[in-house]
Image (cartoon, rainbow, N blue to C red):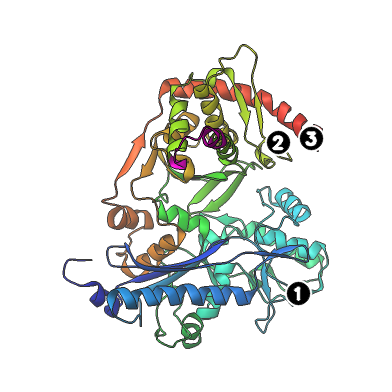
Amino acid sequence: MNGKDTPQQIIVAGKTALGIEFGSTRIKAVLIGEDHTPIASGSHDWENRYENGIWTYSLDDVWKGLQESYQKLSKEVSDKYNTPLKTVGAIGFSAMMHGYLAFDKDGKLLVPFRTWRNTTTAQAAAALTDLFQFNVPLRWSIAHLYQAMLNQEPHVKDISYQTTLAGYVHWRLTGEKVLGIGDASGMFPIDSKTNDYDASRVQQFNKLLAGEKIAWKLLDIFPKVLVAGDAAGVLTEEGARLLDPTGQLASGIPLCAPEGDAGTGMVATNSVAERTGNVSAGTSVFAMIVLEKGLSKLHLEIDMVTTPSGKPVAMAHTNTCTSDLDAWINLFREFVDALGVEVSQSKLFELLYRKALEGDADAGGLLAFNYFAGEPITNVDGGRPLFVRAPESPFSLANFMRAHLFSAVGTLKLGMDILFEQEHVQIDKILGHGGFFKTEEVGQRVMAAALNVPVSVMETAGEGGAWGIALLAAYLGRKQPNQPLEAYLSDKVFAGDKSKTIAPDPKDVAGFAAFMERYEKGIAIEKAAVEALK
């Protein structure tokens, strides 16, 4: 707020921005004011279904969830500010990336929505990775399309439009077949020089289409690529009724380009400038680093996407982070309960995490593998959590906890080493978020030791992807001429944001490196355990 206008005046005047994100378990709507802070929100829980061997959501679920989350937000505005929500300054939609939504010329869905979770595309992903000399993960939209071609699915010849979930919702509400570049970078490789699909690889794919006697070409069916700040259409009358069946919301509201959840996560953590990055560490862990230039060669361990303004981003992802840590802490919970001692779960977590700071720098020679699932980076195809030690290793609680905290980010470290050592990527700082960083200082110190860069954690935990897409909607309407997204976020959104930064401690860095030597040798033990305990 600017000190003059009341919240009611801001809402009535439409000096707001609305962001709605479709996550894998929740659809969330956030309305922000002139100062970019949330003034109302609404959400709807939903679950994917496993039907006929496919992970999917029905399109009815999409609209029911969208309408309910908007309705709850609208009710909160009405209850809290005593004014109806009739207009907003700008709207943005974001969603889980990748997957497969294919429509015919009449806009009819040809096959049920295949989400990013489906791993039925191994043949296509491998063939395209080889053809493009560019890593095409199983979840990418182009892998789904090519797998449908390889399977000779009859619907392929009838495709008139293929898009992502965010692109689909945007299209139905505006009539525009467009996609933000970050989301598009999970459909097909992007050329960051042209901010468009990579032209030479489009040609390579069109040759595959011609070979299969398919009449359309790739760009005939793909959405047009837009970057942050580009106009992406307005809410039509039909779209306004789809979003708000009560008829209150006006049509004609401008929309920003629909984006993917990776892009909105970067925006919400102010990690869109070159040489910055963010690491999300919870059940799984992934790091996204904004590069100064593309990678020199193909690395199967690294996914390439872009920021919402088109800068290349390298992503290292591992399937498991804190699950094994949590399991051990639950074991200690049982012990505490058996003693009849009252200790809260948060206190127990903090006590055990902090204990790790008292351990030997290299965790005393102890070794842990946190694998609840397989990890592509280490070529391990199953999960067997393991703890190993030599009889003479100093086996203390502090070393035990330190080994498990190190293990939680061990595989990520191997992925990041490809960027740091082989590609000579430079990074000034990284922003951490997620449960791994909840106990003050501990997770930050471990991550700083692993990556050997300063790690910051915001005092105000990020509001998440719905806030991120609301910021992109605000940027559409409020940016100054020639003001890049990173400048807008730094100057207008995060200028007063307090964060705590921890620089890597040389002793911790050396200790983590010694642990990683053991860890790399120990991968053979993990593979043997997977084999032996089938």
Inter-mark Cα distance, 2 to 1: 48 Å
Prevailing secondary structure of the magenta residues: helix
Q: Amino acid at mark 1?
A: Ala
Residue 423 shows in this picture: no
Mark earlier in primary sequence (3, 1): 1
Residue 373 lies left or right of residue 212; in this view the side is left
Magenta highlight range: 333-346
Inter-mark Cα distance, 2 to 3: 8 Å
Residue at image mark 3: 533
Classify mark 3: residues with Cα within 10 Å, few (<14), some (14-19) or many (20+). Answer: few
Is residue 27 inside the magenta stretch? no
Classify mark 2: residues with Cα within 10 Å, few (<14), some (14-19) or many (20+). Answer: many
- Classify residue 323 by image quadrant: top right
Residue at image mark 2: 384
Residue at image mark 1: 215
Could you tell me residue 35's position as x and y percent?
27, 63
